[in-house]
Image: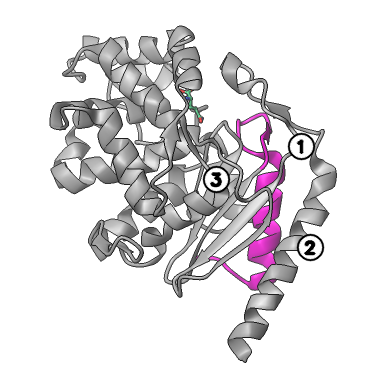
Amino acid sequence: MPDALASLSMQALLNEILDEVRPLIGQGKVADYIPALASVVPDQLGIAVYGNDGQVHVAGDARTPFSIQSISKVFSLVQAIGHSGESIWQRLGHEPSGQPFNSLVQLEFERGKPRNPFINAGALVICDINQSRYAAPALSMRDFVRRLSGNPEVTVDNHVAESEYQHRARNAAAAYLMQSFGNFHNEVEAVLRSYFSCCALRMSCVDLARAFGFLANEGFCQHSGEQVLSPRQTKQINAIMATSGLYDEAGNFAYRVGLPGKSGVGGGIVAVVPGQFSVCVWSPELNAAGNSLAGIKALELLSERIGWSVF
Ligand SMILES: NC(=O)CC[C@H](N)C(=O)O
């Protein structure tokens, strides 16, 4: 009975939180630097919580797929750590950048070695590492997230991927700059294609909450039965999410929410409560740092009301 009661109250809480943040819709701005993302309906709002007990609680548009964008940077990093382990850190750092996600300034100063895997330059290096490993990197990624989410229907939105490729100037600049420093091993255009295909995966809040479950569960994905990472590697990924998951707003997110998290310009944010839950919230309108405005507020209310925090 207490479990049923707990379920009911989690459900009520999620509904209440969405009602509270809904008035914020209209204050942010949908990402339009990728034209195919500009047409998303801005007033969608959803949340899903996945517990280590296997239960999912949802509210709002939690089952509507959206463009996961930079949330894919976590999956790419997990793949790279899975096959190459600690050696990846010769190519990039795990320090916060304090810079916007697509900034180039630091990259020149730091001789083509990106600060961390969750800014674009860092994710491009990780995709370069994966490109050397897999014959079909985009397909390996798609299959990986299908297993992690338990949803065999997850697909790449080719229209978004193509739109990103057409407007690739900044990402291409970062990749060619790294190549000039000897920190890029594959053909830049091919790696850009792989990178955009990861960003253009379409997943719902439920898919993402389930796919991040292993990070709340010492690296074990219960629905696929896969030990994705060791418990120690899992802690390390969570630590990088906590320090760098929201770009130059990581400090504000730690202050307000207090959980490891990762955002994307599609308006999704995933957060992890180690040992307990993974959560995904989605609202497409972004703040100035490129993070979901209502999404951050929803996670702040949730962590405050349940007392979740790693600090
Ligand atoms: N912050 C993001 O979600 C950015 C991802 C986007 N695909 C880009 O490269 O610009």
Residue ID at (34%, 18%): 193
Closer to us: 92 or 230 = 230
| Cβ–Cβ under 8 Å for marks 1 and 2 | no
Q: Position of residue 210 (x, y in %)?
A: 45, 57
Q: Which residue is mark 3?
A: 204
**Which of the image's four quarters has the N terminus?**
bottom right
* Quadrant assignment, res 40: top right
Residue 94 visible? The answer is no
Residue that sits furthest to the front in the current view: 153
- Does residue 151 appear left or right of residue 1 in this picture? left
Q: Secondary structure at mark 1?
A: loop
What amino acid type should be assigned to the residue bearing mark 2? Answer: Glu
Tag of residue 16: 2
Looking at the rendering, the stretch of residues picked out in magenta corresponds to: 283-311
* Amino acid tagged 3: Ser
10 Å crowding of disc 2: few (<14), some (14-19), many (20+): some
Q: Is residue 300 above or below residue 170?
A: below
Q: Tell me the tag on residue 24.
A: none
Mark 3 / mark 1, whichever is N-terminal: 1
Q: Position of residue 111 (x, y in %)?
A: 27, 19
Q: Could you tell whether 276 is left or right of 307 in the image?
A: left
Mark 2 or mark 3: which is in front?
3
The three-letter amino acid code for the residue at tag 1 is: Asp
- How far, Cα to Cα, is label 2 from label 3? 20 Å
Tell me the SS state at disc 2.
helix
User: Is residue 291 within the magenta segment?
Assistant: yes
Pinpoint residue 10: horizontal percent, then vertical percent: 67, 72
Q: Which residue carries the number 1 mark?
A: 43
At x 27%, y 64%, the residue is 225
Asked if residue 286 is among those painted magenta in the image, a careful observer would answer: yes
Near-viewer residue (56 or 129): 56
